[in-house]
Each structure stands twice: as structure tokens, then as C-alpha cells.
Image: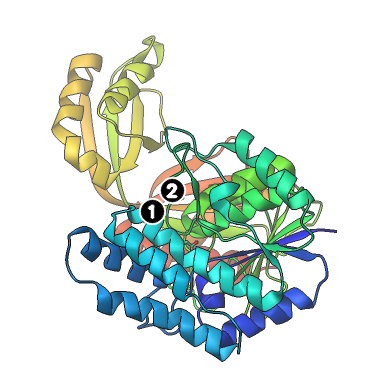
Amino acid sequence: MVKVVKFGGSSLASAKQFKKVADIIHADDSRRYVVPSAPGKRSKEDTKVTDMLYACYDLAAKGKPFDEQFAAIKQRYVEIIEGLSLDLSLDKEFDIIRSCFIGKAGRDYAASRGEYLNGLVLANYLGYDFIDPADTIFFDDYGRFDGKRTYKALGERLENTERAVIPGFYGSMPNDTIKTFSRGGSDVTGSIVAASCNADLYENWTDVSGFMIADPRIVEDPETIKVITYKELRELSYMGAGVLHEDAIFPVRKAGIPINIKNTNAPEDQGTMIVESTSQKSNYTITGIAGKKGFTSISIEKDMMNSELGFGRRVLEVFEKNGISFEHMPSGIDTMTVIVHQEEFGAAEQEVLAGIHRNCKPDSIVIETGLALIAIVGRGMKSTRGTAGKIFSALAEARVNVNMIDQGSSELNIIVGVHEEDFETATQSIYDTFVTNAD
Ligand code: ASP
């Protein structure tokens, strides 16, 4: 059994957190490959080392003094090393980093040092080997992750390494410069490492005990999701934000490896398992509810639209030409509605309207803004009668007007569009119907 364990920034923010991490790793012999983030926040007001590195490098790149900021970064590591009583000095490493800052080695290089140094400290503390992703995780000339090269190099390396720490967040370009994934990218590294060694499980340790059924900023103390499928998670992608990097799903999913989201501060909690498929029924008909504000709907009406060949294509072509992707597209016999992100649409509004008039000669176009979309997702919905009925009675009872309904063809989700001001009430009422008052 092989487990790859990734620890987020708050799990490695201080010596105290490092000790918890070591306890977790030592508690299970199969936790052989460890992917650390850079030290995160120790308290709400604290700053992540990654952000300190970006800010410090920006000063250096402008030729401004950066000694004070640099010293503060070094101090974060010194405190951890001293707190763990390690016989380790990073002085030489910091000298190299300093000269690379002066030599303008790039923002990605600068940010990557957060993980690199944390990896050195953790490897020393655990007595594990250190594998530098600069030698094993690769991007191509376009800056896209190069799976073929990576899986070969990293796979071979791991095959010959019993236990290792592989820092998250970065790899190298064909010209040997450092490149990072987008923010939160250590999750992606963890997934790549798991796929490279064909792990049995990818444990992603963070500071919450998994995904919650609804956003805790809206619903008080929502329950945790025990098991969720990759498909469900994709449908709930608005929700995953902040817990797991969206791109972290793909490498492990392809390799059939489940992900377990776990809490470093409460390791006994089961967390959330993300799996390809499961025979396990969820406790409730729905697995999760997620939503977002900031959508606009553009409804296009034209008599006999249903028999006009290519009408839909011509409408969508206009959006495509203006670089706007659409979120949903409910339609009626003579109407078609395109739902888009307000921000994206706002910038090209008049071009799009003119384009639709020109391309499609509609009878009318109606724009409605200030919409929120709520996705109600659950693998259990397919086999349960009356789910849609329950959703709409809940919304009606809460006096929420529904502007749009869209049931995904997989019967895995129902999306409702409501006015932004009803968003919170709608979410709460759906949660109460399916979870609080579940029968
Ligand atoms: N340290 C990086 C960030 O803050 C990557 C990570 O933690 O996953 O974005």
C-alpha cells in the first residue's frame, strides 16, 4: 500500500504544525511520499510565505531595497527549524536565493522557493529523501504540464526511493527555468506524484475536515460530505474552490486513485473521500449545494426559431467571437437563453447584441442581470422520485422566485437561477429540506 500525502500551508505554518504532520506520517507506514506547501498563515492576520516571496521579489526586480522583507522570510524558517531543534542551516540556500533575486530569476522562481525550503526542512525532520521537482516535474514550451516526460522521470525516481519529500507548486521549463502551477498548485503536484507512483490513495491534508454540503458562510455548521464522486465534484466546482485546486482532480482520476481530504488539526475525522464511483449511498438524496452570484441572462426570442436551421449555432458564434463562454443555455420553442458571467459579458455587451441582431435577426432580446445560480448535485437524485418537486416547494415556501431551471442530462444535478438577493435564502431552504429535515 502506498499513500501520497500532501500538506497545505496552514498544516506547515509553524514548528507546532510540523509536529502534527510528523505524527500523522509516522502513524501509517504507507505514507511514503510527502508533498508540502510553503508555510501558510499562523493566524488570520498572518501572511503566507508565498505572498511574502512575491512581494519581496517585486521589490528586488525594481531594484529597490528588499533586505527587511527577505529577513522576515528567513525568520519564518529559522523559527520552524529552531522549534523542531533540527541540526540544519539554510544560510547557503538563502544566499543563493538572494543572488537570484538580484539577478531577476523571475516571479515563479521566487514563489517556488517557499515550497523548496519547506521541503528541505520537512525532509530533514522526517529523515526522508528530498526530490526536487525542478528535476522531475516538467512543463512544455507553452507552459503546459508535460505529463509524458514527468511520469517517466518522476515514476523512475520514486521507484528507486522508499520515502521522499517532493515540494509542491513548481517544476521546470524545457530551458531549465522554474515554473509554478497557479495558486494553490501544490494540490496538483500531490496528484501528479500519486499518479506517478500508482498510489492507492492521495491524502490531501488541510485545515478543514472535508467538503461541506453547503457553504458555511451561508448555512450554519453544515454537515460534511463523506463520499463524493469526481463527477459530482465537477458539478459542484463552485464549492470546491479554496479546498482543492480544480486541476488536482485530473491526474489521479485518470489513474483511478481516490482522494481523501483530511484535517491536520483533527486527524481522527474521516474527511471527504473523492472517488470515481461508489456503491455507497449518500446519507441524503443530495450530495451538495453550491452557488455563485454574478450572472446575466440574454434571452433571444424569434417566431419559428425551432425550425430555423443553425439558429443556435449562429447565436453561440457571436459569444464565441467575443471571447465569452456560456454557463448554461435553457431553451423554449421560440426562445433561447444564454447565461453568462456578468463580468465577461459586461465588457463586450454592445458588440454581442449587435452581433446577435446581425447574425440571427431575432424578434427581441431581453437582458436580465444580477442572477445567482445554485447547483444541487447528487448521484442519489436519479433513483429518487420527487427531488425537483421538493426543491421547488422549498423555494416557493421561502418565497424565492425561480428564474431558470436546468437539469443536467446526467440527472446528477439541477441548476436553478434566482435573483442575487434571494441566493442565501434559497440555499438555506434547500439545505433544510434535504438535510436538516431529511426523512
Ligand atoms: N504556496 C502556494 C500558494 O499559496 C501553493 C500552495 O500552497 O498550494 O498558492
Residue receiving disc 1:
108
Contact between labelled residues 1 and 2, with CB atoms less than 8 Å apart? yes
| Res 366 → quadrant | top left
Give the number of marks: 2
Tell me the kind of residue under disc 2: Lys
- In this picture the colour scheme is rainbow
CA distance separating discs 2 and 1: 5 Å
User: Residue 255 placed where, x, y %?
Assistant: 72, 42
User: Residue 18 placed where, x, y %?
Assistant: 60, 81
Q: Earlier in the sequence, mark 2 or mark 1?
A: 1
User: CB at mark 1 closer than 8 A to ligand 1?
Assistant: no
Nearer to me, 279 or 36? 36
Tell me the kind of residue under disc 1: Asp
Mark 2 closeness class: few <14, some 14–19, many ≥20 residues within 10 Å: many
Residue 399 seen: no
Nearer to me, 306 or 83? 83
Mark 1, secondary structure of its residue: helix
Mark 2, secondary structure of its residue: strand
Horizontally, residue 113 falls left or right of residue 65, namely right
User: Residue 325 placed where, x, y %?
Assistant: 35, 34
- Residue lying furthest right: 1
| Res 152 → quadrant | top right
Residue receiving disc 2:
179
Residue 119 seen: yes
Q: Residue at x 35, y 59 (%)?
A: 100
Q: Residue at x 60, y 47 (%)?
A: 136
